[in-house]
């Protein structure tokens, strides 16, 4: 495909070049702002997963352009990849799922917190929808976790989300932290794409919530002091064993002689599988035995009909 054919087909691609944006995604943030006015009164922003930098460009041009003193606008941009410098944008290169990157971002906001955090993060798409949705959701949760450290109460969080079948769980998680959660699909986002954007407004964490970067489920070096976490900070779902000690232990082998003295009698499965994976293997084995003139072995296999062969 020639360069010009892409230019003709995609108006946003063409406009991005005409207007000097580094990527066509610039229009997504512009259109989200037109609808939700997320830039109003904002001068401190974090742009997560920012490269090549079109969202940072939009932030820099809009916020610095409308500020009486452009140097008062603080924009921190983070990405795995380096990007060319932009006026008024501080860059951090790192993985937003890593504690060290989160700490570096947090260190920029020790005084005044950010009023807006945006995240256009996307993993390298594999084409396996369930996997892509899962990884995207993890990226969004990593972004949310960082956001809980740096966003001021009342602030806004905007992030790319894949609207897959389990997306309501993510909405529920976001609703814990924001009183208003909306989903939006800007005109510049292709209809063929599963992507949308969550616009989470009025950051209001649960009372007593203390942001933490610890993920006890993933961090194997964690020493277990999660016992200290209480109330809304306690994220571990309690584990309870059920069934008392008189029940059979599923990891034990028991003798075939039953407790009541009777011998164990084999019983066929109550419901054999309807389409077992071994059906093809059985047919192939039979075919090769007939071809070689061998008499069939005496192996007994239960087929789909439940009959013994
Ligand atoms: N908003 C950007 C713009 O307008 O130029 C485009 C962002 S691009 C769609 C997605 C970015 O997410 C990529 O640059 C990629 O490097 C970044 N990314 C993906 N996973 C990341 C991670 N774990 N940490 C940091 N950046 C990540």
Image: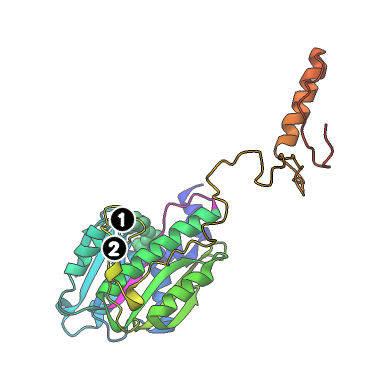
Q: In the rendered structure, which disc, 2 or 1, sits on the residue that comes first in sequence?
A: 2
Q: Secondary structure at mark 2?
A: loop
Provide residue 31's location: percent of width, then percent of height.
Answer: 43, 76
Q: Which residue is mark 2?
A: 214
- Segment tinted magenta in the rendering: 115-128
- Disc 2 residue lies near ligand 1 with CB under 8 A: no
Q: Give the residue at mark 1.
A: 219
| Residue 31 forms part of the magenta stretch | no
> Would you say the magenta stretch is mainly helix, strand or loop?
loop
- The picture places residue 33, in percent across and down from the top left corner, at 39, 79
- Is 125 included in the stretch rendered in magenta? yes
Q: Is residue 283 visible?
A: yes
Render colour scheme: rainbow
Circles 2 and 1 in contact, beta carbons < 8 Å: yes
190 left or right of 265? left
Q: Is residue 85 visible?
A: no
Above-or-below relation of 68 to 166: below
Pinpoint residue 174: horizontal percent, then vertical percent: 42, 75
């Amino acid at each position: 495909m020639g360069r010009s054919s892409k230019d003709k087909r995609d108006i946003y691609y063409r406009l991005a070049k005409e207007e000097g944006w580094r990527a066509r995604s610039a229009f997504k943030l512009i259109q989200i702002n037109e609808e939700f006015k997320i830039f109003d009164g904002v001068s401190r922003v974090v742009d997560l997963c920012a490269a090549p930098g079109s969202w940072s460009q939009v932030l820099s041009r809009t916020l610095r352009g409308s500020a009486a003193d452009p140097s008062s606008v603080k924009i921190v941009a983070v990405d795995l990849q380096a990007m060319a410098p932009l006026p008024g944008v501080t860059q951090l290169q790192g993985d937003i799922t890593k504690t060290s990157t989160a700490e570096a971002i947090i260190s920029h906001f020790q005084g005044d917190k950010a009023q807006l955090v945006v995240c256009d993060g996307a993993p390298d798409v594999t084409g396996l929808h369930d996997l892509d949705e899962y990884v995207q959701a993890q990226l969004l949760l990593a972004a949310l976790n960082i956001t809980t450290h740096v966003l001021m109460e009342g602030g806004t969080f905007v992030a790319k989300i894949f609207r897959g079948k389990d997306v309501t769980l993510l909405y529920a998680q976001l609703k814990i932290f924001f009183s208003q959660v909306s989903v939006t699909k800007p005109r510049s986002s292709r209809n063929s794409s599963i992507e949308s954007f969550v616009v989470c407004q009025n950051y209001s964490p649960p009372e007593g919530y203390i942001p933490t970067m610890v993920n006890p489920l993933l961090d194997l070096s964690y020493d277990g002091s999660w016992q200290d976490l209480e109330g809304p900070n306690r994220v571990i779902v309690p584990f309870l064993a059920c069934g008392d000690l008189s029940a059979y232990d599923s990891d034990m082998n028991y003798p075939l002689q039953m407790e009541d003295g009777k011998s164990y009698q084999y019983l066929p499965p109550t419901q054999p599988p309807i389409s077992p994976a071994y059906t093809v293997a059985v047919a192939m084995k039979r075919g090769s035995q007939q071809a070689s003139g061998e008499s069939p072995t005496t192996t007994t296999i239960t087929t789909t009909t439940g009959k013994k062969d």
